[in-house]
Image (cartoon, rainbow, N blue to C red):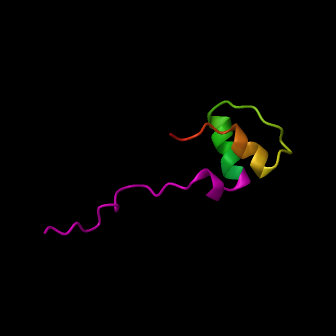
Amino acid sequence: MATVIGRNRNKKTQKSFKDMTVAEIKAQLDALDIEYDKSATKADLLSLLPQKG
């Protein structure tokens, strides 16, 4: 049996959307050219992000 050591060492750890801060969510929305209300709640902002799949 082979042992794999450090297989995730080179992969960037990805945050789930729920773990992102409001600022990170807004930056993601800006990068995707998705408009949002600047005073929107985190839940509202999350609902605008495309679902991963």
Question: Is residue 2 placed above or below 33 in the rendered structure?
Answer: below
In the rendered image of this protein, does residue 19 appear above or below residue 31?
below
17 or 35: nearer the viewer: 17
Most frequent secondary structure within the magenta stretch = loop
Q: How many marks?
A: 0
- Give yes or no for residue 13 being in the magenta stretch: yes
Left or right? Give the position of 53 relative to 46: left
The quarter holding residue 37 reads top right
Residue 9 position within the rendered picture, expressed as x and y whole percent measured from the top left: 34, 62
Q: Position of residue 52 (x, y in %)?
A: 54, 41
Does the magenta portion include 8?
A: yes
Q: Quadrant of residue 50?
A: top right
| Residue 17 position in % (x across, y down) | 62, 51
In terms of depth relative to the viewer, which is nearer, 32 or 46?
46
Q: Which residues are magenta?
A: 1-22
Residue 18 found in image quarter: bottom right
In percent of the image, x 70 and y 45: which residue is there? 46
Q: Is residue 12 left or right of residue 42?
A: left
Residue 45 picture location, percent across and down: 74, 44
Most extreme residue toward the right, as rendered?
39
Is 6 located above or below residue 16 in the figure? below
Q: Quadrant of the N terminus?
A: bottom left
The residue that appears at 19% across and 69% down in the rendered structure is: 3
Q: Nearer the viewer, residue 10 or 51?
A: 51
Residue at screen point 22% across, 66% down: 4
